Image (tube, helix red, strand yellow):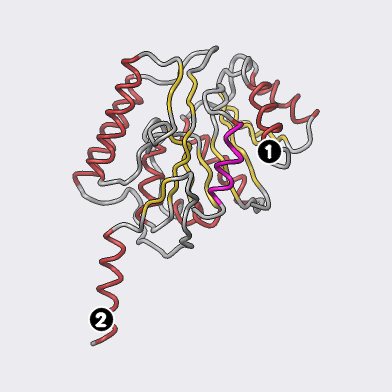
Amino acid sequence: MKTVLVITPTYDERDTLPGIVGRIRAAVPAAHILVVDDNSPDGTGLIADRLAAELDGVHVLHRQRKEGLGAAYLAGFRWGLDRGFDALVEIDADGSHPPERLPALLDAAERADLVIGSRWVAGGRVANWPRRRELLSRLANRYVRLALRLPVADATGGFRVYRAAALEQILLGSVESRGYCFQVDLTLRAVRHGCTVAEVPITFVDRTSGASKMSAGVLFEALWRVTMWALRTGTPDTHAPTRSARRAAPAAARRWPRPAVARAARRRRSVSAGR
């Protein structure tokens, strides 16, 4: 990838932000970093401004209020696409996503449209998680796979690389998801648009400081939206699938084929053309 933008949303992450920025720069020195701060009351935005003033390639996007993870990423995507970055990365600011694995994800993105740092493929794992939380995550991802017939092991994973051209297609329709199901929403859109999806194993480490943003409301939104998408057997995107570049993913990643719905559409077009 020629130009890479790493997007990290923040809300009350003053203790972890400097460290994660340093680790990202050490892992991928040429990457730009965009901190999207939702007016954190603990002063995270001021720390982000200081980092941007001291370090080349660090940028800050200030938002007026907290509107959810999805809204923050959408704002970051728009910022990056408007400036012509080739690849856009999602990463948490709390240290749970290992920046040291970013080179492996970017390497996979040379041959895939979306790369997910996965906890639930061979070689992936979680650290410092209570058994109950691990079980909940595994069950949630299994439900997503079965309900949406989505061939991805970690559809809720938030450590990702998107190729810009694919992301522009994925975001053609309105994205209403704001919380936990935002990642499922974009994964489903990618598959329905015929994007190549790869999964690279990572070790997800539970945060060591600060408070989790997970809540009962966020979980309810995820369950409700996934169930609604499954009941109408469609995609949250209102646009028809489009053709995108398809390349084989590396051996270290998991590659998923174009969905059956797209193959059926191609067969219908071929029959029509022969009449």
Residue at 23% over, 38% down: 227
**In the image, farthest residue toward the left:** 231
Q: Would you place residue 256 above or below residue 26 in this image?
A: below
Q: What is the C-alpha distance between the residues marked 2 and 1?
A: 49 Å
Residue 193 place in picture, x, y as percent: 39, 57
**Front-most of residues 197 and 265:** 197
Q: Quadrant of the C terminus?
A: bottom left
Residue 4 place in picture, x, y as percent: 65, 46
Q: Would you place residue 224 above or below residue 169 in this image?
A: above
Q: Would you place residue 121 above or below residue 126 in this image?
A: below
Within 10 Å of disc 1 (Cα), the crowding (few <14, some 14-19, many 20+) is some
Residue 16 horizontal side relative to residue 49, left or right: left
Task: Specify the segment rendered in magenta.
Answer: 100-109
Residue 157 horizontal side relative to residue 210, left or right: left
* Amino acid type at image mark 2: Ser
Residue corresponding to mark 1: 28
Q: Would you place residue 58 above or below residue 219 in this image?
A: below
Residue at 64% over, 25% down: 20
Magenta stretch: residue 106 in it?
Answer: yes
Circle 2 SS class: helix
Circle 1 SS class: loop
The secondary structure that most of the magenta stretch takes on is helix
* Amino acid type at image mark 1: Val
Within 10 Å of disc 2 (Cα), the crowding (few <14, some 14-19, many 20+) is few
Residue at 69% over, 25% down: 48
Magenta stretch: residue 25 in it?
Answer: no
Q: Which disc number belongs to residue 55?
A: none
**In the image, farthest residue toward the right:** 54
Residue corresponding to mark 2: 272
**Front-most of residues 67 and 105:** 105
Residue 269 place in picture, x, y as percent: 29, 76
Residue 2 horizontal side relative to residue 185, left or right: right
